[in-house]
Structure formats: C-alpha cells, structure tokens
Amino acid sequence: MNYFDEYTKKFDMTVPEIEYKYHHSYRVMDNMVVIAKSLSLPLKDLEVAKCIGLFHDIGRFEQFKQYKSFKDIEMDHGDFGEKVLRESDALKHFGIPKEDYEVIYTAIRNHNKYEIEDNLSKRALMFTKMIRDADKLDILYALGNPEIKWIIAEDDNEISPRVSEAFFSNRQIKSSYNNNKNEDLVDIFSFAYDINFKVSFDIIKNEHYYQKIYQRLINKELFKSYFEHITKYIDERTE
C-alpha cells in the first residue's frame, strides 16, 4: 500500500478526477477481495488479487496529468500502467512471488480492453476476468452515487442505431461507437454484458446499481428501454 500512496502523492489530489482515481483504486482492490473469497482462492492468490486491484489504474494518474482526460485515445492506461509497474519494479514491495509478476502485468494490461487477448494461461485469464469485474462494479457504484457529481453527464443527442443494435443484442458497446455523452451512458449500461462472476451479478442486483444510475438521469424516457433491458438481463443471471 505504501508504494501506491507514495506514487500517487506526486499528483494533485485537489483535482476531483485524481482524487476519484485514488479512492477508486482502493475500492476496486476491495472488490477483488470479495470476488477472490467467493471463488475460495487461497491466501497467496488473495494477495495477487489485491495487488492487481490497487494498481490496475496506476496509468490513469499520469494520463490525466498530461492530457486532462481519461479517454484512451491519447494513452492506453492499461498498457501504460503495465509500463509503470515494470519500470519501477513496484511489485517487489508486496511480497508477491516473481512467477506471478507476469500474471499481474497481464491482468492490468487487459483490464480496460474491449476483448481479452488470446492465449492467456488459465491463471492469468482468471485474474484478468476478476479485475474487469471489480473495475466495472466500482464504476457502476460511482455513477449511482450522488456525491460524485461530475462523473455522470447527459446531452441532447440521439443514440445511434449502431449503439442501440449492439446493446439490445447483449453486446458491450465498443467505445469507438460513441459520439456523444448519451452513447457513453449506454456504454456504461452495457457493462453487465461483460461481467464474468456470479458474485458480481449479485452485487449489481443487491446494491441496485443500475436503479441508482437511472434515478440520477434527467431524460429518463430516452434511457427507459435500455434500463429495463439490462435489469431483466441481470435478473436472469441472479435467479
């Protein structure tokens, strides 16, 4: 933990986006613990899970400092996070066996990609799926949290047929499809299509994440069919 805090001290925590990413990292770490325990993983794997959760967005801090944006057009934060960890040799501070370093790098590199890269080991694939769930769980939590005011936004634009077709076909939206804030929100709604573990679906349902997001929206009529479709999808996976 100390290395993460020392690294992030280099950035301005008075900037809401930076402060958010700091706390997001710890919350995602906690989500990784919940998922790991649901899978009855041994203690050594719990430590790997915590490390991946804490460091998954380490690339975000430098990204926002340089570009004042979290859009990966300028910098892929998964790839950059892997680079930061490799060059700093940060993992040596956590008592993680060296044979798991590549597992951690792989999970962080893949946590933000539309699709997971091919030919991963069974172990690397498991942790990659875990961090993808843990990250999405916290983003959904944050979007439904009225205390985090800046993170949710709508506009006056229509949602394109391409985005709608993907959504109602139960496919996560490709970020390249999005041309406005309303399509970004549909993208967020589509997160559930890329959830991998039963416990993650249970958390989404029991914590009412989508209901909380929907209640924050101004143009509820525009998003009503998307909200109803995704909540039905979640209900079917938590029966």
Image (tube, rainbow, N blue to C red):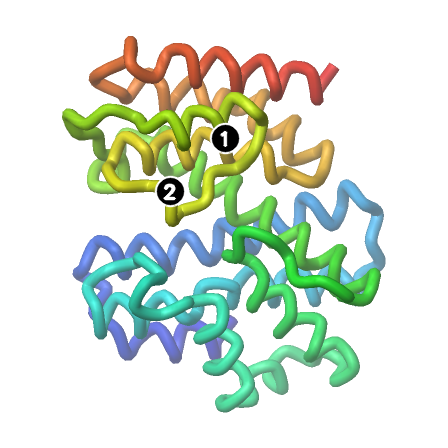
- Is 197 on the left-hand or right-hand side of 88? right
Image-quadrant location for residue 158: top left
- The residue indicated by pointer 1 is 166
Residue 236 in the image: state x and y as whole percent.
Answer: 69, 16
Tell me the kind of residue under disc 1. Ala
From the image, which quarter does the C terminus lie in? top right
Between the C-alphas of marks 1 and 2, the distance is: 10 Å
Residue depicted at 66% across the width and 62% down the height: 117
Residue 116 in the image: state x and y as whole percent.
Answer: 64, 57
- Is 146 on the left-hand or right-hand side of 186? left
- The residue indicated by pointer 2 is 177
Image-quadrant location for residue 233: top right
Tell me the kind of residue under disc 2. Tyr
Residue depicted at 80% across the width and 61% down the height: 43
Q: Indicate the secondary structure of the residue bearing disc 2.
A: helix
Q: Are marks 1 and 2 in contact (CB under 8 Å)?
A: yes
